Amino acid sequence: MRCLMCESLSLKHICKSCQSTYLKPSLYKRHLQDGTLVLSFYKYDDIKDLLHTKHTDIGFYIYNILAKNSLKKFANTFNMQDTFVSIAVDDNPDENYSHTAILNRVLNSSRIKPVYNKLLAQDSVSYSGKSRAYRLANPRNFHLKAFKQKNVILVDDIITTGTTLLEAVKILQASDKEVFLCLTLCDVSP
Ligand SMILES: [Zn+2]
C-alpha cells in the first residue's frame, strides 16, 4: 500500500518515517472546571485529516497508529505506585470498532489495566460543531457499569469544551471512584 501522508510504498497506512516525523507526541495540559487534569498528545489541527478517517474503512488502522505513537508511549513511562483502571468514554462499537476502545487498549501496562464497556452514553447526541450551550443542554447521560477498582484514568479521543469528560468524572465520583487524570488523543483548543 501507499503511505497516506507521503504516498511512498509502505507496509502500514502511515510509513515509519512519517510516523516519526509527523506523529511525534507532545504533552498538552489543561484542567476541567472541577480541576481534573487532562493530558493530550496532539493538537486537533495537526491530525484532523487523520481523525476524519474515523468513519471510513481505514479508521481502525489509523487510530491504532495514533494510539501507539501517543498513549502507548505514555503508558510505558507511567510509573506511579498505585495501579489504575482505564476507562474509555462511550466505547460502544457504533460501526465495526470503537475508536475510543483502541486508545484504551494500548494503555495496558504495569500500572494501567484497561476495562471495556463501563461508561456508555444512553443518548447518542452528536456534539460535532455544536456550542458549549448545546452540549450542556444535551448531556450524554452516561450509564456506568459496576467495577471494583477505585482509581480511574479516563480516555477519550478529542477534548473540545470538556463537557463530556466533566460529565463522566461526575458520574464516576458519584460511584465513589477517583479520577486521577483524563487522557485524550488531541485537544481542539488553540
Ligand atoms: Zn509516509
Image (cartoon, rainbow, N blue to C red):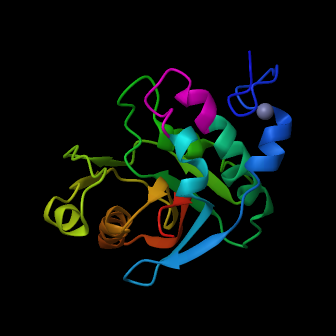
Q: Position of residue 54 (x, y in %)?
A: 48, 34
Please name the residue shown 77% across and 54% down the image: 24
Give how far across and how far down residue 58 sits, in percent.
56, 24
Seen at 37% across and 37% down, the residue is 92
Q: Is residue 58 magenta?
A: yes
Q: From the image, which quarter does the N terminus lie in?
A: top right
Is residue 123 shown left or right of residue 86? left
Residue 141 picture quarter:
bottom left
**How many discs appear?**
0
167 or 65, which lies in front?
65
The stretch in magenta equals: 52-63
The x, y position of residue 83, in whole percent, is 65, 64
Ligand 1 sits in which quadrant?
A: top right
**Residue 102 appears in which quarter of the rendering?**
top right
Residue 158 appears at what percent x and percent y?
A: 47, 55
Q: Residue at x 29, y 71 (%)?
A: 174
**Farthest residue, direction right:** 17
Please tell me whether residue 62 is drawn above or below residue 34 in the rendered image. Answer: above
Q: Which residue lies most toward the left here?
A: 137
**Magenta highlight on residue 76:** no
Say left or right for 178 vs 47: left
Question: Residue at horizontal 53%, vertical 47%?
Answer: 48
Is 109 on the left-hand or right-hand side of 136?
A: right
